[in-house]
């Protein structure tokens, strides 16, 4: 009697998951490098899949961009949670998160993504709220320890990360990280308590930032 066939459907599902992950990673890098109008053919090429495979996973560009956004925010949340859990020093946790968050290229991605899909998408809203909580926990711990100035909130940190990681017009991303890290370190030094100046205005929350973009 012939042997029963192996669990082929499970293998196919695993392959499909890997393809989807490759497409999202390739789209993220392509959008950072070439902008939001990068041809989907180029995304498929970078992912090492055919166009048909890309469209099997994502109905259109907006669908793909939505998934890239969810992926970037989820990875940012994990970096914040890991820093909080693994760093015994409260300010060191903040520094680790800020410097690692630059690797997600939030500054290059955010301006490109905000108008592509519905920002009230429940999945996106949920992930952003989780990000705010995780970063807020880092700030609260550092402020409670007297290491972080008191007039700082989550929005202040994210504005700095997004602005300082956004390449200047006409400047490619290659080699940009060394400048990003220099200026982020200057920013972090300015966050230390005791504060040496009085900041204008109020500390910014993510909710206020989102309202201002509406």
Image (cartoon, rainbow, N blue to C red):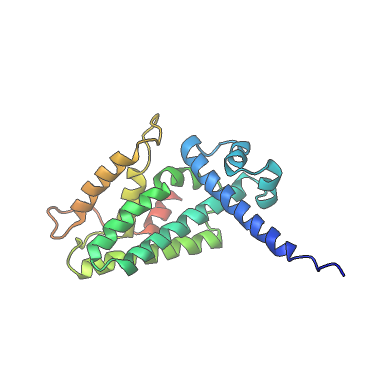
Give residue 150's position: percent from left, percent from top.
20, 63
Number of numbered discs on residues: 0
Give residue 5's position: percent from left, percent from top.
79, 65
- Image-quadrant location for residue 174: top left
Give residue 157's position: percent from left, percent from top.
31, 54
> In the rendered image, is residue 203 in sight?
no
Judging depth in this view, the residue of 41 and 62 nearest the camera is 41
Tell me what residue is drawn at x 37 percent, y 57 percent. 208
- Image-quadrant location for residue 48: top right
Tell me what residue is drawn at x 56 percent, y 36 percent. 38
- Image-quadrant location for residue 166: top left
Q: Residue furthest front?
A: 1
Q: Is residue 152 above or below residue 166?
A: below
Q: Is residue 100 above or below residue 136?
A: above
Judging depth in this view, the residue of 82 and 210 nearest the camera is 82
Left or right? Give the position of 76 relative to 23: left
Q: Is residue 4 above or below residue 58?
A: below
> In the rendered image, is residue 210 in sight?
yes
Q: Residue furthest top?
A: 170
Tell me what residue is drawn at x 38 percent, y 65 percent. 81
Q: Quadrant of the N terminus?
A: bottom right
Q: Residue furthest right?
A: 1
Q: Is residue 78 above or below residue 209?
A: below
Give residue 138's position: percent from left, percent from top.
30, 65
């Amino acid at each position: 009697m012939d042997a029963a066939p192996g669990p082929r459907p499970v293998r196919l599902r695993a392959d499909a998951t890997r393809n989807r992950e490759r497409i999202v990673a390739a789209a993220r890098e392509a959008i950072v490098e070439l902008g939001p109008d990068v041809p989907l053919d180029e995304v498929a090429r970078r992912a090492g899949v055919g166009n048909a495979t890309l469209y099997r996973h994502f109905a259109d560009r907006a669908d793909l961009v939505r998934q890239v956004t969810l992926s970037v925010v989820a990875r940012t949340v994990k970096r914040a949670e890991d820093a909080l859990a693994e760093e015994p020093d409260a300010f060191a946790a903040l520094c680790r998160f800020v410097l690692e968050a630059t690797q997600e290229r939030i500054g290059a991605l955010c301006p490109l993504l905000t108008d592509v899909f519905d920002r009230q998408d429940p999945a996106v809203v949920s992930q952003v709220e989780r990000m705010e909580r995780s970063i807020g926990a880092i700030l609260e711990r550092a402020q409670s320890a007297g290491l972080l100035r008191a007039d700082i909130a989550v929005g202040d940190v994210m504005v700095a990360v997004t602005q300082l990681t956004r390449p200047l017009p006409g400047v490619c991303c290659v080699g940009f990280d060394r400048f990003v890290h220099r200026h982020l370190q200057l920013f972090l030094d300015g966050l230390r308590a005791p504060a040496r100046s009085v900041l204008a205005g109020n500390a910014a929350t993510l909710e206020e930032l989102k309202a201002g973009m509406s």
